[in-house]
Amino acid sequence: MRDRTALKALTLVAALMLALGSVAFPARAQDANAAKARGLVDAAIKMTDSDAAVKLLWQATELDPTLGEAYVYLGLYYNSRSDFTNVVKVYQKLIKHQPNQVGAYLNIGEAYMSFSPPRADDALVYYRKGYALDPRNTFAALRIGELLAQTGRRDEALKYLKIALGDGAKNPTVASEAEKTLKQMGAL
């Protein structure tokens, strides 16, 4: 009963925020939608009812499809439930509206690698797209190198793993993983 009362109060707050946002400045509809979307995200993260929170987050992506925060929370929610199909859907929608979001490509790659069995070919496509957007991204280079090594494409794998190894001070975890894979390949 107490949860329902809290849920109703949060829903009322969210509805009030939406109503106030739509009255404020009709001439700046895009800004109003962005504010409404932020309000929905704020309300969603305070909720105890996951299903209702997820609905608010999806609504936020409709109001402001470029609001990265809504996608991050949706991605975390679905990832925590090992619902990798929806993790992919979340970040594909973000990419549709913000095609230069490197993290979205990497999150899709990670989601594909979390399938059972992993969908390595699909993951590789997204890691490569992320790397193309940011050729200094050592995490993307690591994942590309690992996948290429698994498929026997040694020369190309070495190239990416050496990039990932790069300056270990910047990302010691990535460098350590790259070093481990290079040693397994007999390249170090």
Image (tube, rainbow, N blue to C red):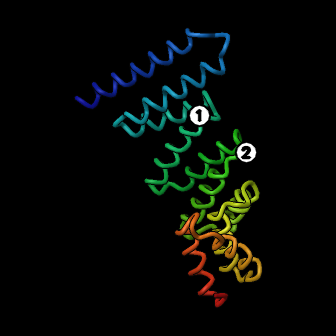
136 horizontally vs 16: left or right: right
Residue 124 sits in quarter: bottom right
Question: Could you tell me how far apart the alpha carbons at marks 1 and 2 are, in whole angstroms?
Answer: 15 Å
- Using residue 33 as the reference point, say whether residue 98 is left or right of it: right
Q: State the image coordinates of residue 118 (x, y, percent, origin top left).
A: 58, 69
Between disc 1 and disc 2, the foreground one is 2
Q: Is residue 68 above or below residue 139?
A: above
* Front in this rendered view, residue 119 or 127: 127
| Amino acid beneath label 1 | Thr
Instruction: Name the residue located 34 percent from the left edge and 23 percent from the top edge.
Output: 8
Q: Is residue 89 above or below residue 61?
A: below
Relative to 132, does residue 55 appear above or below in the rendering? above
Disc 1 marks which residue?
A: 61
Where's residue 4, x and y in %?
29, 28
Q: Residue at x 46, y 47 (%)?
A: 77
Q: Residue 125 in the image: x percent, y percent?
A: 72, 62
Residue occupying the far left of the picture: 1
Which type of secondary structure does the marked residue at label 2 adopt?
A: loop
- Amino acid under disc 2: Pro
Q: Residue 47's image quarter? A: top left
For the point 33% across and 22% down, the residue is 9
Question: Left or right: where does residue 43 sit relative to residue 145?
Answer: left
Q: State the residue at coordinates (39%, 19%).
A: 12
Looking at the picture, does residue 47 appear above or below residue 182?
A: above
10 Å crowding of disc 2: few (<14), some (14-19), many (20+): some
Pick the quarter of the image with the C terminus. Answer: bottom right
Label 1 secondary element: helix
**Residue that label 2 marks:** 99
